Image: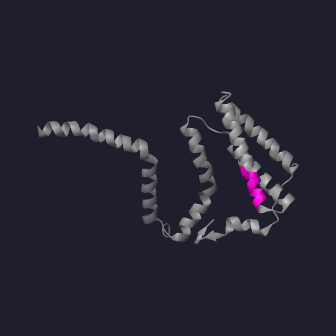
Amino acid sequence: MSSQTNISTVPNRRAALERLWDNAGMLIVFLVMFAALSFSVPNFFSVPNLIGLSLAVSMVGMVACTMLFCLASGDFDMSVGAVVAFSGVLSAMVMQWTGSITLGVLAALAATTVVGLVNGFVISKLHINALITTLATMQIVRGLGYITSNGVSVGIGQESFFDLGTGSSLGIPN
């Protein structure tokens, strides 16, 4: 009877390992690589290096997390880069016009929210393919960024704006 038990548990263990790999494979690879680098690279597991790594991937990480929702639903969003660029241009222009950092950030958040709502409405209610919708949105938003800036580079002259990115809270960079 013990040989039957051993034979039947092997496929169960294999299935459990396959489920684990399917559900958490990327996390497992990340943890193995992190542990290997921590032991093999000097100062890899130091606080300054971890802060530097976090800062290096923060922008891409935020965009990737939102893209995860699109991919999980079986679609993707081609307009992400254009929306990020447009929101930056709009934010800088509003800051120049009003002198208010808060209004600039709120304008960027409002614009990206509107673009997201329009994309969602067109895809879900009008049943237009996500690829077609977001390609069109990408071109429209690029055009809006060009029109908003009059085709010239936009800079931010307020030093206090840079405190948002260079400051820290509880010793952790913003």
- Left or right? Give the position of 126 relative to 10: right
Q: Is residue 71 or residue 56 the one in the foreground?
A: 71
Magenta residues span: 102-109
- Left or right? Give the position of 7 relative to 120: left
Q: Residue at x 68, y 34 (%)?
A: 121
Q: Residue at x 73, y 43 (%)?
A: 114
Q: Is residue 173 or residue 27 the one in the foreground?
A: 173
Quarter of the image for residue 21 reads top left
141 in magenta: no
Task: Quadrant for the N terminus, please.
Answer: top left
Q: Is residue 110 above or below residue 158?
A: above
Task: Quadrant for the C terminus, please.
Answer: bottom right
Q: Is residue 98 above or below residue 151?
A: below
Residue that sits furthest to the bottom in the current view: 171
Q: Is residue 122 above or below residue 113?
A: above
103 in magenta: yes
Q: Residue at x 75, y 65 (%)?
A: 161
Quarter of the image for residue 95 reads bottom right
- The x, y position of residue 172, in whole percent, is 58, 68
Tally of numbered discs: 0
Residue that sits furthest to the left in the current view: 1
- The x, y position of residue 28, in whole percent, is 42, 51
Q: Is residue 68 or residue 35 the one in the foreground?
A: 68
The majority secondary structure of the magenta stretch comes to: helix
- The x, y position of residue 80, in whole percent, is 68, 44
Residue that sits furthest to the right in the current view: 150
- The x, y position of residue 68, in whole percent, is 56, 44
Quarter of the image for residue 49 reads bottom right
Q: Is residue 108 or residue 1 the one in the foreground?
A: 108
